[in-house]
Amino acid sequence: MGNTLSEALWGKPEVVYVDKYKDITEEKVREAKEKKARQLREQAERERREIQEAERREEERRRQQQQQEEQEKQKEAERLRRLQQESRGQKKKLLRYNFGDKHGLRNFASIDKRDIQRSGLRIGVIGPTGSGKSSFINTCERAMKLTEKGTCETQTSGAEGTTIVQEYLDDIGSKFCLVDTRGFFNYGEKEFTAMTNIVYGRLRPGEKIDLDSAEEAGKDDSWDAFSNGLHAIVIVLAATHKDPLLYSGQHMTNLNTIREFMKPRGISPVTVVTHVDQVRDEKELNKIKLKASAATGSPPSHVYFIENYHPGHNDRDFSIELRAMEILNSALLVGERYVRIHKQQQQYAAEERQAAAVQCGANEPIEGFFRRLCDTRHIPYDKTESVIAHLKEEDVTTAKLLRDNWDDLEAELQITSRMKTYVREMLFK
Ligand SMILES: Nc1nc2c(ncn2[C@@H]2O[C@H](COP(=O)(O)OP(=O)(O)OP(=O)(O)O)[C@@H](O)[C@H]2O)c(=O)[nH]1
Ligand SMILES: [Mg+2]
């Protein structure tokens, strides 16, 4: 093998082999072990502290959560306590209610209110079948009597609902009561007659609302005492998919006759929309409010939403009860107004009659006399035709002749004693 030039110049390089373990003494091994152990101990300590810190943080989070839950529970308990207190206050006020409290008695100074003060206001609950009328009455009963269950029979699946006129809350010592009525599928002629019979107090509590013989009840020859009729009307509609009539506007058509009946008489109904638990959307509720208001004629401010007590919501709920009492207060308000309007209308009519009587003098024909009587007492004129014919046969052709011969005629006339009272009052007033 030949030498390279560098070898020739500088000579052969010296090769040094290093033994890398040559310096590792036992001392160094021990130190290394100790260092490693220290590092491991430090790391374990760090991890222990980290775990401790995480546990402390978790404990703190749990404590804060508990504290928050406790505060929320207290807040909820406080809310319920306030609702309960408010509910108690409202209930007390309603129990003490007397006619005139809502508008102030000075607003009734010019009318004779003694009958209504004695008997109290009657609030009729009407509306389509199954809308929740009886359930609403039960809700009011539970609010006013603090019972666990109302006494009003509600629809159970397959069963027929209410068919009898029935008064509720007439036993709590307050000067108002609720009147449950039959639900109608539509408001045709028969339903309308049945309803006016209830409104005018011709159908009394306990009597059946029989649609087939609706005219029968109407045949009663008079409008009963004003205090037996309805003074406020609560129309109950349901806010469910089950009630497409509300959505389609069909209720608006169906209730047309009722609206037209109420308006000129000064009856402004309060509307209650039930089943509100089945509609959660605020926009939908607004839509329903407008539709319900258009159907019943109540201004939107007199349309109330409520979830009644029902089998799916039976536990005491003061917000439900407060809503029911708010509706009762609203009905009392419109009821008082109706009484005032009605009594004023009666007063004006009486004044007009007096003026007419003076004008006609004693020569008023017998037909005219009975026509005035029918107008005053809301009796269909044709119901008096037979008695007029009889009087004419007896040559009693004027009101004066009727008055002069009343003592003899009273016993022989084929009319009810109530009708005789009306005739007597009109002849001799
Ligand atoms: N979810 C829910 N169900 C209700 C509500 N109100 C009433 N109901 C139920 O609706 C059904 C009809 O209620 P009722 O109170 O009997 O109805 P009604 O208007 O008196 O019926 P009729 O007397 O037949 O005209 C019953 O099954 C009630 O439990 C409510 O607000 N929410
Ligand atoms: Mg019912």
Image (tube, rainbow, N blue to C red):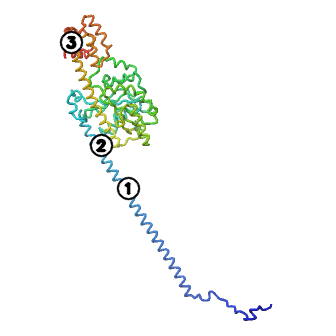
Give ligand 1's quarter of the image.
top left
Q: Secondary structure at mark 2?
A: helix
Q: Is residue 248 left or right of residue 89?
A: right
Please state, as top left, top right, bottom left or bottom right, where the N terminus lies in the image: bottom right
Residue 426 visible from this viewpoint? yes
Mark 2 and 1 residues: CB-CB less than 8 Å, in contact?
no
Label 2 crowding class (10 Å Cα cut-off): few <14, some 14-19, many 20+? Answer: many
Circle on res. 361: 3
Q: Secondary structure at mark 3?
A: helix
Residue 172, relative to residue 409: is it above or below? Answer: below
- The residue under label 1 is 69
Circle on res. 87: 2
Between 419 and 398, the one lying in front of the other is 398
Between 321 and 287, the one lying in front of the other is 287
Q: Is residue 163 left or right of residue 1?
A: left
Q: Amino acid at mark 2?
A: Ser
